[in-house]
């Protein structure tokens, strides 16, 4: 199952909230804070995964392409291209 990015999550929440009731400033700020926390967690997991993959490739004397490693992780996790 693919994970949502924080931006996708925030957009969904705001759209749903506007259909249900007038979006108040405090609710908007709450949703933005939640999205920021999700983004922080996603960035942490991405860094950990990329570092672990690089270390694994280094141990196996494989070619290390950090951009390719990141792209593969992002696509597998968030359903990119």
Image (cartoon, helix red, strand yellow):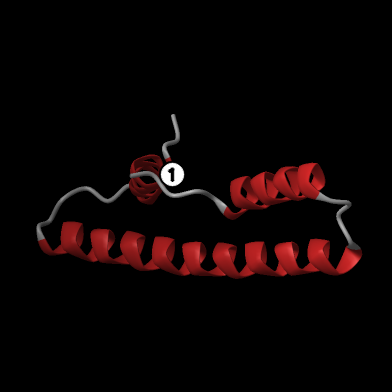
Helix or strand or loop: what does disc 1 sit on?
helix
Q: Dot 1 corresponds to which residue? A: 78
Picture coordinates of residue 40, whole percent (x, y) = 56, 69
Rendered view: 21 above or below 54: above
Q: Is residue 40 left or right of residue 31?
A: left
**Residue at image x 50%, y 48%?**
4
Work out whether residue 15 or residue 7 is closer to the camera in this orientation and state it: 15
**Residue at image x 64%, y 62%?**
35
Q: Quadrant of the N terminus?
A: top left
Q: Residues within 10 Å of mark 1 (few under 14, many from 20)?
A: some
Q: Residue furthest left?
A: 60
**Rendered image quadrant of residue 53:** bottom left
**Residue at image x 9%, y 58%?**
60
Q: Is residue 43 left or right of residue 62?
A: right
Rendered view: 66 above or below 68: below
Picture coordinates of residue 49, whole percent (x, y) = 32, 62
């Amino acid at each position: 199952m693919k994970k949502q990015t924080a931006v996708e999550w925030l957009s969904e929440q705001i759209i749903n909230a506007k259909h249900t009731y007038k979006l108040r400033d405090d609710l908007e700020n709450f949703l933005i804070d939640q999205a920021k926390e999700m983004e922080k967690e996603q960035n942490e997991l991405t860094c950990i995964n990329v570092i672990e993959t690089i270390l694994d490739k280094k141990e196996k004397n494989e070619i290390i392409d950090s951009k390719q490693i990141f792209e593969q992780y992002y696509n597998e996790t968030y359903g990119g291209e």
